[in-house]
Image (spheres, grey):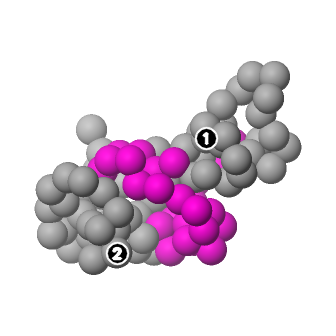
């Protein structure tokens, strides 16, 4: 979590994680005339936090709910949090 805290500019509760195998994220591609096939392959796929760094090495944490994947230049696709796990299990509202 220390690495995640360095990458975002907000207060992160100690029990919130980003890259745990218990954290769940859903991939959301931006559908338009410039969407790439790489991004489309992940559309609506649920990924665990421990998979994110290897799949998306240029990811950027936007806030507690959103990670921009930066899969390629000008990528607008994102990961949206499905579950908070961390130290305690808390479902997203």
**In the image shown, does 65 or 4 lie closer to the viewer?**
4
Residue under label 1: 77
Give the quarter of the image for residue 21: bottom left
**Camera-side residue: 26 or 65?**
65
The residue that appears at 53% across and 59% down in the rendered structure is: 59
Up the image or down, 38 lies above or below 16; here it is: above
Drawn side of residue 22 relative to residue 8, left or right: right
The residue segment tinted magenta is 42-68
Res. 26 in view:
no
**Vertical arrangement, residue 41 with respect to residue 93, above or below:** below
Kind of element beneath mark 2: helix
Single out the residue that lies furthest toward the top: 33
Q: In the picture shown, does residue 56 fall above or below 72? A: below
Q: Which mark is residue 3?
A: 2
Q: Nearer the viewer, residue 23 or 3?
A: 3
Decide which of tag 2 and tag 1 comes sooner along the chain.
2
- Would you say 50 lies left or right of 16 here? right
């Amino acid at each position: 979590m220390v690495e995640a805290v360095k990458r975002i500019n907000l207060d992160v509760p100690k029990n919130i994680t980003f890259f745990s195998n218990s954290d769940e994220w859903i991939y959301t591609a931006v559908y338009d005339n410039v969407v790439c096939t790489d991004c489309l392959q992940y559309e609506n796929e649920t990924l665990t936090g421990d998979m994110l760094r290897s799949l998306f090495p240029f990811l950027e944490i936007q806030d507690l709910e959103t990670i921009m994947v930066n899969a390629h230049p000008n990528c607008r696709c994102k990961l949206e949090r499905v579950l908070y796990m961390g130290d305690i299990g808390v479902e997203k509202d």
